[in-house]
Amino acid sequence: MILTKAQYDEIAQCLVSVPPTRQSLRKLKQRFPSQSQATLLSIFSQEYQKHIKRTHSKHHTSEAIESYYQRYLNGVVKNGAAPVLLELANEVEYAPSLMARIILERFLQERDETPPSKSVINSMLRDPSQIPDGVLANQVYQCIVNDCCYGPLVDCIKHAIGHEHEILLRDLLLEKNLSFLDEDQLRAKGYDKTPDFILQVPVAVEGHIIHWIESKASFGDECSHHAYLHDQFWSYWNRFGPGLVIYWYGFIQELDCNRERGILLKACFPTDIITLCHSTA
């Protein structure tokens, strides 16, 4: 799904006043019925992450942390089974999983009288049964399963979706009888920064030569695309020549402005691939 900047801004504006819940996502789908669920979810997640980055620091002052911790303690004293942490996160407009991390760190620091390591925190967030307090373990679990944008559960889902689309792209390349090297093969050859696939024999797509293909199981908005250009795509271009980026959930149309410089954007696998023998694959 390719959107104009104006269409994207209309969707993003609708997200400003809604909480990051699955109910909000359903309302967004009702508001924009012509857009796919996957595209809206990707935009929904990216816009919320931008909001969290903008407001992250205010939730990590010593005053804020102590306030949240005391509110948590007071809440569970009244009713330990109530979703105290989840409701607190929603009230202060912070991601539930990140709120759970703040409270867990504060709890462990008080218990052990030393700051917990990042690996310990991550392990307990992945498996709350490791938390040495049953009430807190349940509170953290509620935050993890109800967070649709952050946390270990979301990370696993994103990783699985990304891997699924890489397999899809591999199958399509094989179906078209295109010879390629994948990321693992390239790293075995000593490359440290590689696209998902290098074509051993370049092809042409819409009149542009393609040496490599990168799969992105997300929507290409301005923020993410410019970051990818800086961190990945131009590096690939410098090493391997011009290439193709597939944003499987769509992108902002105006971002496809580097074709002449060697980076082509598509929202699906191209159907008009031209091989060296000038036949349609």
Image (cartoon, rainbow, N blue to C red):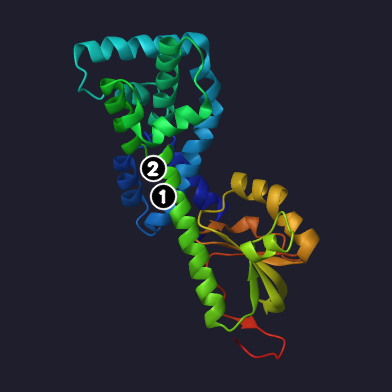
Residue 57 in percent (x, y) is at 55, 21
Instruction: Give the position of the C terminus as an image quadrant.
Output: bottom right
Name above or below for residue 89 compared with residue 31: above
**Label of residue 157 in the image:** 1
Say which amino acid is labelled 1. Ile
At x 32%, y 38%, the residue is 145
Q: Label 2 to label 1, Cα distance in Å?
A: 6 Å
Residue 42 in percent (x, y) is at 46, 50
- Element marked by disc 1: helix
Say which amino acid is labelled 2. Leu
Q: Mark 2 points at which residue?
A: 153
Q: Nearer the viewer, residue 67 or 131?
A: 131
**Label of residue 249 in the image:** none
At x 41%, y 56%, the residue is 38
Q: Are marks 2 and 1 in contact (CB under 8 Å)?
A: yes
In the picture provided, is 254 more to the left or to the right than 102?
A: right
